[in-house]
Amino acid sequence: MLESELKEHNRFFLNMGPQHPSTHGVLLIVLEMEGEYVLDPQPVLGFIHRMHEKMGESRPCSSFMPNTARMDYVCALPYNHGYVSLIERKAGIEVPKRAEYIRVITSELNRVASHLLWLGAYLLDLGAFTPILYGFDDREHILDILESITGSRLTYCYYRFGGVYQDIDDKFIEATRAFVKRMRKRYAIYEKLVTKNIIFIKRTENIGIVSPDMALRYGMTGPNLRGSGIAYDVRKNEPYSVYPEFEFAIPVGEQGDCLDRYMVRIREIEQSLRIIEQALDRLPDGPVRSKVPKNIKLTPGDCNFAVEAARGELSYYLLGDGTSTPYRLKVRVPSYSNLSCLPELGRGILLPDLVSILGSFDLVIPEIDR
Amino acid sequence: MVKDTKDYKEDFLNQGFDATETAYDQRGYHLEVVLNVNQVRKFAQTAYELGFYLVFVTGFHVRPDEGHDTGNSGLEVVYQFARYDQPYRIKACVSVPNSLEVPSISDIYQGANWHERETRDFYGVVFGGHPNLNPLLLAEEDADFHPLLKEETNLKSLHEVSWPSEAPEVAKEGAEAETGQ
């Protein structure tokens, strides 16, 4: 046998997913393998495609609200936030300051919950079982807090055009303050359990390095981009809501490997807590919802609104035609662009490293498939 | 809080693109560029060299008859670019000709690969030079089904879904003041 034939002979295809535990949802990756090495990983999408964009243009804009939470179900409130802000920008609706503060508090709580879920799930991918129990314990507190005010635990539909559904009460504020205090004490546990664990470091350091140029070519955003050292965060770069009123930093990594992406998310939890604390301290009085016409007319023309979701930049792009139904509604989701670099990033690496990279990307498949 | 901003309008005008500044407060992007099909790749190359990243590629469907270039299909492809270092968003749009073919930019921005496949899924736009234009979000057997094409009765013409300020120069100021209210 010639050497080239021998190589051909040793190649095989491996289906990772669509029900593989480390794909976090119904994602299929067809791997062309040579031994333990991945030659060409090709994600196959669309298993849970629901055509949210078609639903967006077939009903009045207010009826689309519940859909927004069903794309990224792990961090739904920023999706609420982006959509209401888009319609508010388009229709020129004013939002009371208290409502914006409540939006920021709840969005940041949701972001922390999302990062905690990711933390547990990622380490589960890498073979560590214990951290998910700690992560879910903390996350449970957030879900309880959010449930008390929004009525749901996962697929929130809490924001309304011109404000939020209902005001927060003292109980909510008390519970949130207690959570912030508790969460700060937990860092030490995570540090001891995970960050300094030698197996964890071996599985993540220098694995899956995303260079700044590569990130740009694929349009990566969020912690995956910040891991590569680019301090891009929509909350700072294109400030929306009341984010300019708070002090917070944008954690960045150095070389863009899995460990950097991990560190960025861990440090982002603290920044979110800082925002929550400041917002609670300065929470203004007043109404939480302004008067908004029942039938909002979307004037002709397009409009875009970008927010920072837990996984990166979420953009809504809308085309109005003078009726209350959008003529076109495009949802740009962060995980879609983030995952698209996998065929390039995963070429020539070991299979276990691919699992580590996928986990470090913090993918939410319903968001990608929409 | 907002970093120093540079206006990139001149850079694009110098390269021969039809770029117009827009009201960010109303539209959420800073610059609008109207391209013709032959300019798409040059535009993407220019944007890449200036350090923009690709936010998304998508399309929309309008009534083909009026306005615009002759022989368009009623489909429009929209590109959005933005920057990591400062708030600056660009919307570029191109009318798709009757052949439904628009050049692919997936060799300049590899991230466009999936966005273009998605646009082909939803609208049937063929991106010339794309390495793998198979269905991505839709099923293989639905390759000829394009769910976001509108029925004839629901179609609106391009000017009905555009900002009034895109009308001729004379009407511009009055129209903008109206939308600002």
Image: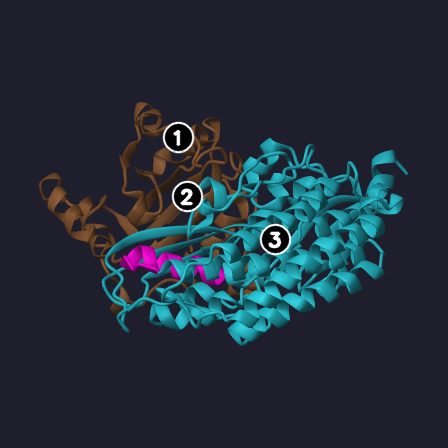
Chain colours: A cyan, B brown
In the rendered image of this protein, does residue A225 appear above or below residue A121?
A: above
Residue A85 painted magenta: yes
Q: Which mark is residue B80?
A: 2
Q: Is residue B143 in sight in this rendering?
A: no
Chain of the residue where label 1 is placed in the rendered structure: B
Q: CA distance from mark 3 to mark 2?
A: 32 Å
Q: Which residue is mark 1?
A: B5
Determine crowd level at label 1: few under 14, some 14-19, many 20+ residues with C-alpha closer than 10 A.
few
Tell me the chief SS of the magenta region: helix
| Magenta stretch bounds | A79-95
User: Would you identify the image quadrant in which residue A215 lies?
Assistant: top right
Q: Position of residue A259 (x, y in %)?
A: 75, 42
Whether residue A160 is situated above or below residue A283 in the rendered picture: below
- Is A59 situated left or right of A364 in this image? left
Viewer can see residue A283:
yes
Quarter of the image containing the C terminus of chain B? Answer: bottom left
- Judged by depth in the image, the label closer to the viewer, 3 or 1, is 3
Considering every residue shown, the one lying at the far left of the view is: B170
Horizontal arrangement in the rendering, residue A199 relative to residue A132 (left or right): right
Disc 3 versus disc 2: nearer the observer: 3
Q: Residue at x 52, y 72 (%)?
A: A149
